[in-house]
Amino acid sequence: MAAKQYDTVIGLEVHIELSTKTKIFCGCSTKFGAMPNTQTCPVCTGMPGSLPVLNKKVAEYAIALGLATGCRINKRTIFDRKNYFYPDNPQNYQISQLYVPICEEGFLEIETADDAGNDAGTCGSGKSIGSKTTKTIRIHEMHMEEDAGKLTHNEAAGISLVDYNRSGVPLIEIVSEPDMENAEEVIAYLEKLRMICLYLGISDCKLQEGSMRVDVNLSVKEAGSKTLGTRTEMKNLNSFKAITRAIAVERERQIALIENGKKVEQETRRWDDTAGESYSMRSKEDSKDYRYFPEPDVPPVLISEDWIEEIRSRQPEFREEKAARFVAEYDIPAYDAEILTQSKHMAALFEETAKLSGQPKKTANWFMGELLRLLKEAGKEPEELTFTPKYAADLILAVEEGKINQANAKEVFAKVVLEDVEPLSYMEQQGLMSLSDEGALQAAVEEVITENAGIVEEYRAGKDKVFGFLVGQVMKKTKGKADPGKVNELLKKSL
Amino acid sequence: MQIEQMGATALSRELKKGTVSVAEAVAHYQKQIEEKDGELQAFLTLTGEDLQRQIDKVQEGIRNGRYTGPLAGVPVAVKDNICTKGLRTTCASKMLENFVPSYDATVVKRLQDAGMLVLGKTNMDEFAMGSTSETSSFQITKNPWNPACVPGGSSGGSAVAVAAGMAPLALGSDTGGSIRQPAAFCGVVGLLPTYGRVSRYGLVAYASSLDQIGPMGRTVADCKALYEAIAGFDEKDGTSVRRGIRNSEECEDSALGRAKEGLSADVLRENSVARLKGMRIGIPKEYMQSEMNPEVREAVKKVAVLLEQQGAIVEEMSLPLTEYAVATYYLVACAEASSNLSRFDGVKYGYRVDGEQGLHEMYKKSRTEGLGEETKRRILLGSFVLSEGYYDAYYLKALKVKRLIKEEYENAFKTCDCLLTPVAPGTASKLGTSLQNPLQMYLGDVDTVAVNLAGLPALSVPCGLDKQGLPIGVQFIGNAFCEETLFTVGEAYEALRGAFPMPGEQTAGNGKEGV
């Protein structure tokens, strides 16, 4: 084991694919999964004579993300060409931004549990809130660029095929400062960034599907040292789990090199998640000269104060604000508020349902318990929920009014949230309404007492355990429609 | 009246009157091509079967009143770097020898919308890189005034098509003089519009920030009509400008406003010569250096005298940055070209070497074999000036000088309505001489490149013949978006000069003043 202590220094380059309807420089659809090369035109296939025209939505999304992360928005931003030859890149240059990116100098506040990775940080500021530590991760810049096409290699046939459907799909690259020290901070940063994008509705940020791509720049240095070590860049990280593992493995690899008197090479490495290790893709020496220069086909984008203000006025309530408001407005626990706001869509459904039912706490319970369980069972994302909040509210009220018992209500709730079924008529059709007639219920109770004289004797002799059995008998007699609370009450009285 | 003596607008009038049919007009030009192009080699591709469809469509459109514009029914020759759907577009490069575009350039659409027909595609320097049309991979275009001489370039084929009467009008492109210089060498009129006036969508890019498509014709009026058909905002070109194609008020105030004093509106409308009165014309002394051909200098001076006699105020002035224009131009143009031409890699279309090899080998061989010497020279030069460590010293500095040149011209137009210069320091050179010394060839662009760097419009008008009988051109440079000022002065000069002869014609105009 290493005798010395080492600090890890991590910076991230994150690409997010924007969910605009059309590509960044042409009118082709960005929809995923179409037949190869069916969403293409002269522009995104690099035909001679074609010209790019900026999709303003892309700048708008970038500005919104910049505002959400405290960035400075450059009033005049330019596109640059990054020149390199590769068949997935039809023009053999990528239109990106280098010299004046759209957003600069922002930050994200992250929270991590107190006990993890609390080495003395050299960057960022840490302060403790209860069991959690908040930390500021600085954002260096954000820029807009176009995605490349997709290459498929068929080794057996000895051919490579290219699909340009993805060519020209808009991306924003978010470059952080090297302010992170461990995987937990990295994940917290990514989660935070993802949540902001989801709330803004600018990207679905799915690592597995490539709509969020993360490159990890990592170096190590002796604990407390002011001098940064040589960094490597890790690519091909397709899950948070892979990122966490890759960080641990790369940290150890670099420490081992140093301990053995070797040097860490500045290079780009590719993570192999199956092997649990990385290998070198290219070293700094053979890094390409991209010959960047200002893109002459796309004029500078001028961003007026009015435009920024218009975008600012349309910014959504972000997760933290929403959660705090839920706690204050609906008097639900902070934990619940945090879970409910994990998805902007789910938060909206909760709020609507809570308002309609007038029972925010009960609503929160239904969401936290049943709804999340049902989603998990169905393997669905909260975003996929399409039920009518009024239906959920009606059901919750019916329970509160004793019109249906809890067990049956759960069954109806599943119908409501997964199939958007109107609950009151469904309850009626299925005969799931509680026996509201106290006389009928009393009759059932008395029948059970008569039919189970022996057990009643046992109970009266002090054997409390059999009470449950008697309740069950009443429920059976009422075909489950009785409110168990009411049954308890009547049964106790009659015994 | 013979078709070949008619200007394009005159021909359109006859077509609309019905005295000539579209088929007859097209047949006339086809016959001219058949007779002359074997020697002159102006066309690379002639429109095939589709031409009959175009003829029928246009004839029907004229009949039913769909096409009423000043050029309805007129066939046009199109430079081969402008995309034509279904019609081979080669940029005179082996690289694109068999390339057939899937779409029409915006200018081609606009021609067709105005009832014009595409007669064929014209030869040029490969990817518009050259000043003689000799860098074409396919053929050497000859100057109709003397087939031993170059037609100029890069739009040499278009200039020759018009000069030799094989087409009444043509489209060219101008990055550093490629419309104006061949127009001058071939004795026709050519306009470089203001950068952003004409959509570049469908023009195979050489240097994006300098390229501009423009008209070439026998007269200023013909060029003006074609310009008006193709100019105007296009949402497919982010650099195209959203404004009316007519002179802006600033142009009118400075130039024609003064001339209007004391003249009736009718006179002004009808008589461009009358509008010369009070027009301030500057002659930048840097364009009249001693190294130039004295015959060219004399011809340009004669133009000035002629205009002065009609009340124009001609003054010598100075544009000191002119000496940096050629170097700046080649840095900017080659840098952009090195990137623009990187798409020609053998992967998607165009020339690709045969045989099994790795990706990089395929790239290398395809480009080595598919691209010509001059093109490769410019790609290498451009790649070099953009590379790490050299960017600031070359490309960035060139961009700064470009801005300074633009400012210098802006200042000049505070006191001038237009500038008067030669189009080139000499007349057409002998075939086969210019490529021996590329640097010398680059220096021949000295009178045209600054205008592209400044993004201004300029008009090239024939103004005489040298002792060898080769045409000389005069250049009128206008303020940005003041093309109409150029048309006014150009038409006035033409009226004073008299008709310019066709090649081989008895040079009747030669005795006239100014020619």
Image (cartoon, rainbow, N blue to C red):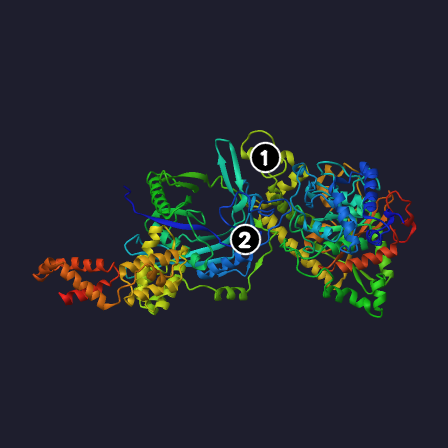
Give coordinates of residue B413: x percent, y percent: 73, 61
The residue closer to the viewer here, A103 or A149, is A149
Amino acid carrying mark 2 in the image = Thr
Q: Nearer the viewer, mark 2 or mark 1?
A: 2
Can residue A108 be seen here? The reply is: yes
- The mark found on residue B373 in the picture is none
Compared to residue B393, the image places residue B377 above or below, namely above
Give the residue number, with chain letter if any, for mark 1. Answer: B364
Whether the residues at callouts 2 and 1 have beta carbons within 8 Å, the answer is no
On the rendered structure, is A121 left or right of B421? left
Q: Cα distance, mark 2 to mark 1?
A: 34 Å
Give coordinates of residue B322: x percent, y percent: 71, 53
On the rendered structure, is B358 left or right of B224? left
The residue closer to the viewer here, A240 or B88, is B88
- What chain is tagged by disc 1? B
Can residue B292 be seen here? The reply is: no
Q: Residues within 10 Å of mark 1 (few under 14, many from 20)?
A: some
Give coordinates of residue B343: x percent, y percent: 60, 42
